[in-house]
Image (cartoon, grey):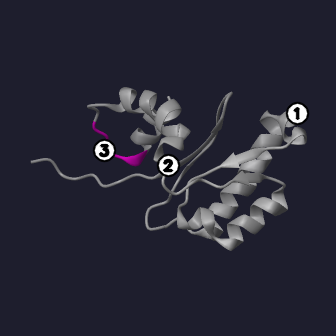
Amino acid sequence: MQKYAGKFFASIFWDQDGILLIDYLPKGRTINAEYYSSLLVQLKDILKEKRGGKVTKGVLFLHDNAPAHRALATQKKLAYLGLQYLDHPPCFPDLAPSDYDLFPGLKKQLKGRHFSPDVEVIAAAET
């Protein structure tokens, strides 16, 4: 038997040109509206830095219907940051572009590998 290593949670923000931000949730934390809103502030700064011209043209933001994403505080933060968001239909999981564009390559790279410390998972995912 193998010891269960537990789960490791990452939030990945990306656009058509690539990954913008990866945030690894610290152990013992949960993603709530406050935590997610802080990620949106980081994302806005990264968008200005990496995709300056696109930010001035407007950004359409798509996320799923997780409670932290739907929270009023999150919606207010998106509006404050000038990020428009698209409502994600609740019954259409096939509209999750990450499942088709981003995760298959990541899963292929990580398939069959075992990691001990979290830093190994982070290094492998970012590679």
| Secondary structure under the numbered disc 2 in the rendered image | loop
Report the mark closest to the observer, 2 or 3: 2
List the residue tagged with mark 3. Answer: 116
State whether residue 119 is above or below residue 19: below
Report the mark closest to the observer, 2 or 1: 2
Q: Quadrant of residue 76?
A: bottom right
List the residue tagged with mark 2. Answer: 92
- Near mark 2 (Cα within 10 A), the count class, few <14, some 14-19 or many ≥20, is few
- Near mark 3 (Cα within 10 A), the count class, few <14, some 14-19 or many ≥20, is few
Q: Which residue does the image show at 69% across and 66% down from the upper left?
A: 74
Sequence-wise first label, 2 or 3: 2
Kindly identify the amino acid type of the residue bearing the numbered disc 1: Gly
Q: Could you tell me what secondary structure mostly forms the magenta stretch?
A: loop
Asked if the magenta segment contains residue 36, the reply would be: no
On the rendered structure, is 54 left or right of 63? Answer: right
Sequence-wise first label, 2 or 1: 1
